[in-house]
Amino acid sequence: MSTRVGVGLASSSCDSLEEPTTLVRHRVVRSSARVRSSVWESVPGGVGSIPGMAEKITMTSDGTLNVPAEPIIPFIEGDGTGVDIWPAAKLVLDAAAAKHGRSVAWKEVLAGEKAFKETGEWLPDATVEAFRDHLIGIKGPLTTPVGGGIRSLNVALRQILDLYVCLRPVRWFQGVPSPVRHPEKVDMVIFRENTEDVYAGLELQEGSVEAARLIEHLRDAYGWQVRPDSGIGIKPVSETGSKRLIRAAIEYAVRRGRRSVTLVHKGNIQKFTEGAFRNWGYELTREEFSDVAVGWDDCGGEPGGKILVKDAIADITLQQVLTRPDEFDVIATTNLNGDYLSDALAAQVGGIGIAPGGNINYVTGHGVFEATHGTAPKYAGQDKVNPGSVLLSGVLMYEHLGWQEAADDIVRALEQTISEKIVTYDFARLMEGAKEVRTSEFAEAIVERL
């Protein structure tokens, strides 16, 4: 089996099995300081073509991601309903891969409550090392421990591995119940900066000695009057962090043939953080992408066949994604804005129960794909909830690996299943004439339609 595709635009040929393929190679060709194009190549022969010979995904020094025919992929089952949704998602992912002559060697690693019960740690070092060593992984929802220590296991993984892009595509699937009149107009991809902003966790508690010292310093050094009974948080937004995020968004738009990239910010108030994010985005467009993209200020909104880079204030964006969603395509934004936007948009197309997410470092090759919802412990073990979020995160992962046909098959089968009104309880209660099925039965129905 041979594969040669652009990232996210895969095609494959299964008409010849005489020259088995060991590796699918993801080669990133850099021009100046950025990624300019990507191709996938097949590597004939070798031990990787032998059935059952699982191998690690690797990243070479020249920016090449090598994906074996049977990659080893670490997974975290997840807390709460993870016991239900992960097996369902795995069933579909395995079936879709097998259809195209591939397979995944799943490697379970621990985090969350399951890890704490078995090891006494919420996020064992071995788990972090597994994701670091194998490059690509997937996870279900995790419980955040109550009390001190780690604020969020999800955020901890993103920061430890420097997964600076939170990739959140949002689109409507035929038949999914929606609270808006035209959900089919929602087709956006959010690039949310993942390591800075208020999520950096730089906070001091109200009443602490440290907070009092900082308040005093701010008064003496800058004349800032902060109430003495305040908690203090620092919001870092760097040129480095902003440009690498926006660079990834524009590169995605180029690869996928998207028409625009919108920089969403609150720069009218936060001029030196969010306002700087906007300015750095336009600067990056002029310096690195002038051949394929143009900023609004440089073209008056007439890009002339290039990708249009524009900007919008965060609060009006939250209104306009409801009133005129078809004006948005790729969105690049800071961490907190991206959190609000991705969940608000998900509500228009079926909720976060089917909202996928990926956390990616496009430079090192690391990626952890994840269910974007919570653990819902009251439903754990009931074989009841929608597995769509973790399943579609697996679709994102397959796209990242270059397994586009398998990814497309899952989406098609999922959409067909929902359009036939075979759904889990969350959709069934909103659909007239629906057939409510269990989590496992929903997955089986998708597999039947593969």
Image: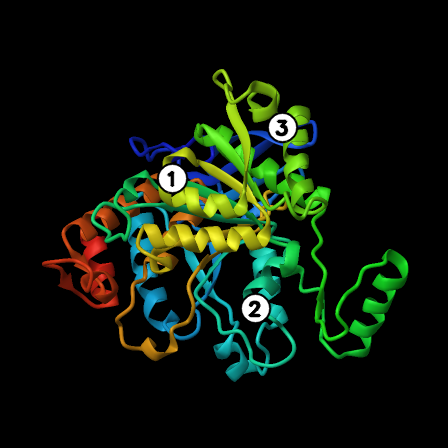
As rendered, which of 14 and 227 lies closer to the eye?
Answer: 227
Q: Is residue 268 visible?
A: yes
Task: Identify the residue at horizontal 36%, vertical 32% (top origin).
Answer: 11
Question: For the residue marked with disc 2, what is the amino acid?
Answer: Leu
Classify residue 104 as left or right of residue 154: left
Label 1, secondary structure: give it: helix
Query: Badges 1 and 3: C-beta atoms under 8 Å apart?
Result: no
* Disc with the residue nearer the chain's start (1 vs 3): 3
Nearest to the eye among marks 1 and 3: give it. Answer: 1
In space, the residues marked 2 and 1 are separated at their CA atoms by 32 Å
Give the residue pinned by disc 1: 325
Judging depth in this view, the residue of 313 and 224 nearest the camera is 224
For the residue pair 150 and 37, the one nearer the viewer reads as 150
Q: Residue at x 9, y 59 (%)?
A: 433
Q: Which mark is residue 285?
A: 3
Amino acid bearing label 3: Thr
Residue occupied by mark 2: 153
